[in-house]
Image: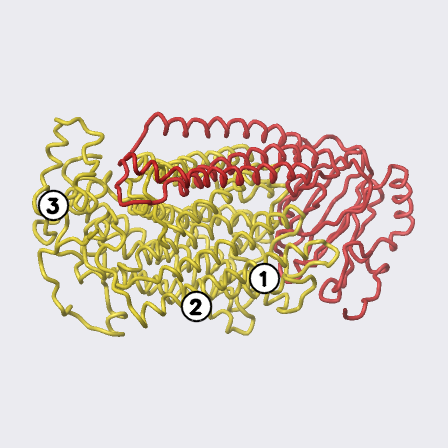
Chain colours: A red, B yellow
Amino acid sequence: MISRLKDRVAPAVTRRRLLAGVGALALAGVLSGCNVTFGATKGVTTQAHEEFRLWYGMAIAGIAVAVFVWLLIFWSIFRYRRRDDHIPKQTQEHVPLEITYTVIPILMVIVIFVFTVIVENFVDSNPTPSGAVVNVTAYQWGWIFQYAHANGVTVRTAEKAGPTLLPRSYFAKRYPTLTLPVGETSRIYLRSADVVHGFYVHSFNFDRYAQPGVTNVFSFTPTTTGWFPAQCTQYCGLYHSEMLFNVHIVTDAQYTTWLKNAELHPQSLTGATSQPTRPGPQ
Amino acid sequence: MTIAVERTLPIPAEEHGPTGLLKWITSTDHKVIGKSYTITAFVFFCLAGLMAMLMRTQLASPDNNIVSLHLYNELFTMHGSLMLYLFAGPFAFGGLANYIVPLQIGAPDMAFPRLNALSYWLYAFGGLIMISGFLTTGGAADFGWVSYAPLSSATNTPGAGPDMWIVALVLTGFSAIFTGVNICATVFYLRAPGLTMFRLPIFTWNMLVTGILILIAFPVLTAALVMLWCDRHIGSHIFSVAGGGVPVLWQNLFWFFGHPEVYILALPYFGMVTDILAVFSRKPVFGYRGMVFATMSIAALSTSVWAHHMFTTGTVLLPFFSLMSYLIAVPTGIKFFNWIGTLWRGSIVFETPMLFAVGFLIVFLFGGVTGIILASPPLDFATHDTYFVVAHFHEVLFGSAVFGGFAGLYYWYPKMTGRMLRNDLGKASFWFMFVGFWLTFVPQYWLGLAGMPRRIAEYSPLSGWTLLNRISTSGAYLLFIAVFLMLVNFLLSFLKPVPAGDNPWDAHTLEWATSSPPPHHNFYWIPPVRSERPLWDHNHPEHTTIHSHMPANSVRAATSTVHSGPGVHPDHGSRSDFRGEDGDE
């Protein structure tokens, strides 16, 4: 027994250093993660902000749990590697310990569930719209944005969907643009004309299916002006990867001007008229 | 240290029955069928892996044109279908479980040997039908492995390929159901004397629970597929709005199958890893009963979480499915701590199976944590149908079916063939796989968080996704090398065999008490079963744990020593003798 202990002194030092190294790396990872938002976007709507805050908390909790369990695993496999032919103590159970690691996860689940429900209720609260009300119809393979309060101003994908759209860029005018006023709550009625599509705006941290037979209703309150790429995320057939659109968040004044202009010149909004000629092969 | 058990009876040199190809085709022996399943599933794994290589190559550059849009859609559909329906499930419950479960419980065969053979042939021909969709003029099915209605209607995806996909799934579905019945009956009725339910190896326990889950989940899929076929061919309108049907019903039916299916794919591998961790730590499974109850609660919860795949449909009760999904973390967490408890203060040796098993722990943990994130509806809104989800489910499914499955394959390969696999090559294969795995899938989390949708064949150079996609593709090539090394390892074991012996790992359970490979009826001798580790008790009588949780003078303790004699011959006695009699459960 004593000789075995002696054998372990030297490796123990190395192991401790290794462990310290692993810990430092993990800490560095966590800290640098704080600056880069763990890869997620803070978003440009109040709903997206709330989702981001939930993400931030869950990511920290998740990384903490993962690092804790990983350290236990790494500790076990380094510390208890076979060094001689002895048979270890045949421990089969430790009931208090087992109860502890059943109860603690249950408590954690309750906490994250409460936060989840709070955020979920906010995101799905769907307040009375003060901005645009838009009927969005997804079809194979494009989008129609029809504004309810503006004599049915309609913006739609260029009819030439298909391979002629390649190569493309996110902000090319041939993709339809959903224009929304900043600071106002806009409501979307989402439908599908054929198969299931996914209405996904990355900067809104939001995805919702457009399904035949179902009308989904949700709201956004944008906080920042700008252009944001968006795309169908639910696989919908051959040209799924080309079913893109833009979201343009503008000031209230710009929105009013745009809407007036759109009512006067509805043609200018359809992709067909503003379709640039296809650039040559790259 | 010599571990081999002394045989009391010689093994006859000749086994009766046909040999060669005829033996493979006509056999009802669970060992032959198990091997056929394992090999067939591995072939499908390699095919699906090659499809993944093509897809990753396509995605290595924006606006790439290596494959057409249509071919890409076929590729991801068939990659998912082959991996999930034809590899991950059948590899576990058709291949390894078929071979190992009867051996682990000291049975001569599965309960229904002919049904077992039928299962295999349904599966083999189902698989062939699915893959031969590529030969039809319209190509293979291209509606995704989930085939959401109404994309899967005759109008949207016409042609023979999709029909063949449906028929293939019905056939393999029946194959799975029959195997599920067989496993349950075998575990309930063919256990060796003394082998009570709470002395079953964890792998057998998990296979029993998997069998029950199969019986819950697969009939729903099979029924849904029949409905889909009727919609496509005889004019019913179950899933079409035009005829008054409800498309979202498909999603409910599919995921009512689909989520238990995820655990049908995971639980067997949990079982393998549990047994392997114990053997290579020279310790019993820590918290054995906790492990069993955790498996059962995972299975029970898995039937009430299906709509977490449908959070963004706007048609399901979000808090209920969210809470149920979160709760699965609790039994999974118990399993993790039990695994660590098994390693704790053990005497751990890193043979190849152990490397893969520990790799599974490290990999699966991260997949589990990101699963918790996805179980939160608001966070699912932000990441649904993006590469975040792709990374998550590859981490859990690749983690379990490939790391866990390869751990099991490396562990039981000596038993199945009588030959050892090369350890160095196995370790090299592991490291390629481990590094390749993180390189492939961690960038995909970032891609998903950066907004890249799944199932897109191309993306814009302006999207900023190129670098991460390139890293992911290079990782995928490392995975290719890892599998190639494994194939070389198999080949070497056939060209220059290294005999394995009966019990090369100093393992605990009954399958190692017979020869490698086992004789036709499996056992000539079975050690007395007085705990969940009969062979360990036999080989290390001074380190047993037989009475650790029983009062010393209890009736149970007295009856459980009935078979402490020189061993039991399973051929003796009536069928009812095969049941454990001390009522430990």
Q: Nearer the viewer, mark 2 or mark 1?
A: 1
Residue B280: image location, x then y, percent:
32, 47
The answer to whether residue B317 shows anywhere in this view is no
Residue B468 drawn at (x, y percent):
64, 54
Q: Residues within 10 Å of mark 2 (few under 14, many from 20)?
A: many
Quadrant of the drawing holding the C terminus of chain A: bottom right
Indicate which disc residue A102 carries: none
Q: Looking at the image, can residue B321 be seen?
A: yes
Label 2 SS:
helix
Mark 3 or 1: in front is: 1
Q: Give me the disc on residue B129.
A: 2
- A156 and B305: which is toward the camera: B305
Q: Nearer the viewer, residue A95 or B52?
A: A95
Q: Which residue is mark 1?
A: B56
Whether pointer 3 and pointer 2 mark residues with C-beta atoms closer than 8 Å, the reply is no
Q: Crowding at label 3, few (<14), some or many (≥20) Cα neighbours within 10 Å?
A: some
Q: Amino acid at mark 2?
A: Ile
Label 1 marks a residue whose chain is B
Q: Quadrant of the N terminus of chain A?
A: top left
